[in-house]
Every structure is written in structure tokens, then in C-alpha cells.
Amino acid sequence: MIAALVQGFATGAALIIAIGSQNAFVLRQGLRREHVPSLVAFCALADAVLIVTGVGGAGVLLRGNTNLLAFTRYAGAAFLAGYGLLAARRCWHGAALPTATQNESSLKAALAACFAFTFLNPHVYLDTVVLLGAIAQQFGDAGRWWFCAGACLASLSWFSALGFGARLLAPWFATMRAWRLLDSMVAIVMLSLSLSLLRH
């Protein structure tokens, strides 16, 4: 069972840590120290729900639902493009340097954006529901849930490190130039992912 737990953690981490829109958003919020506990909890819980759904057998059903995947692909591409353009605008014009007490957005708006980054990305379904769900079946009825626990733990560990650890980078983001570089990276990631969704 420990082997299944470790394998689940390693596989989950490999899929989650890859640079993506959700990670870029959590990193930026972490640097701004905006709603970090809530966003970390949301991301970890959302991943856990998707992973449990896949391990429970829903991955097979999702794999054949082309309409759902098509909807999330186009809706996700539009949302990512919009957010990417906003980041590019911030990079171009520059914005006021954020402070620890300055809240740019409400908790509701931040969670809504995080919801969109999570559930309008078809890759999240392919990775967490289909792929992790398929791999988990190799460990049998009992072992697959240990695999599931490992993958969920990897998600919680990563988003906690990303959100709460971002403040360690704060000294590097004490200048407008650093924030413009971050926004340029966010814009590139978002727009690239949007184009990749439209091409598939």
C-alpha cells in the first residue's frame, strides 16, 4: 500500500507541477498575498474531487464525452486569452506596486477566476480524471485508493508550497520591473495555452 501511495504522490506531482494557468495565477496571488489560504484550499479540494472521480471510474465515461471536452476547450481558450491580454496590458502600462495590505480583488472574484482556470481547462480532466484514474486501476481495488491519497497529497503539498512559499520571493518583486516581468510570463503562459487549446 505504501508503494501505491508513493507512486500516486510522484505521478500526481509530475502532472500538477508543470507550468500552467492555474499555477501562474496562484503564484501571482501568493506574491500579492491575496486570499492565499482560500485559493490553496480551493485548488487542492478541486484536484481531490477530480482525482477521486477518476479513480472511482468516471475517467472511462469522460473519455468518450467529446461534447464536454469540446465545450471546455473553447470556453477555456477564450478565458485564457482574455486573462492573458489583461496580464499583457499590466506589463505594458505598469501598475502600482502591490503591498501586503492592498487587495486588488475580492475573495469572490479570486475564487471565480481560480474556478475558471481549473474547470475550463480540458487538460485537467485528461490528467486528473482520465490519466490518474487509469493508472490507479493497476493497483487493485484497495491499492487504487492509496494511489488516490498520494496524488491528492501531492496536490495539497504543491499548492501550499506555491501559495505560501511565494512570499519568500517577495524581496525579488520589490520593483516595478520585476512585476512587469512576472506579468509578461503570465501573459505568455496564458496566451500560449489558449492557442494550444484551439489547435487541438
Image: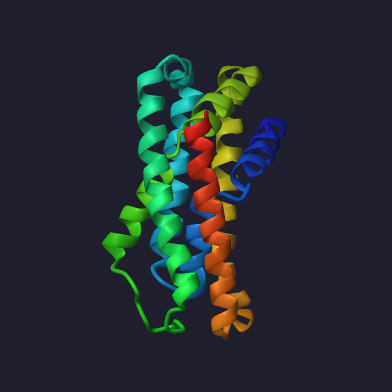
The answer to which image quadrant residue 121 occupies is: top left
x and y, in percent, of residue 174 in the image: 57, 85
In the displayed structure image, the side of residue 4 where residue 183 appears, left or right: left
Query: In this picture, is 194 found above or below 84?
Result: above
Which residue is painted at 41% across and 18% down in the image?
Answer: 66
- Of 167 and 194, nearer the camera is 194
- Of 86 and 168, nearer the camera is 86
Judge whether residue 120 can be spotted in this image: no
In the displayed structure image, the side of residue 117 where residue 154 appears, left or right: right
* Residue positioned most to the front: 92
x and y, in percent, of residue 102 in the image: 37, 82
In the displayed structure image, the side of residue 22 where residue 174 appears, left or right: right
x and y, in percent, of residue 160 in the image: 54, 60
- Of 52 and 131, nearer the camera is 131
x and y, in percent, of residue 155 in the image: 55, 47
What is the basis of the colouring in this image?
rainbow
Which residue is painted at 57% across and 22% down in the image?
Answer: 142
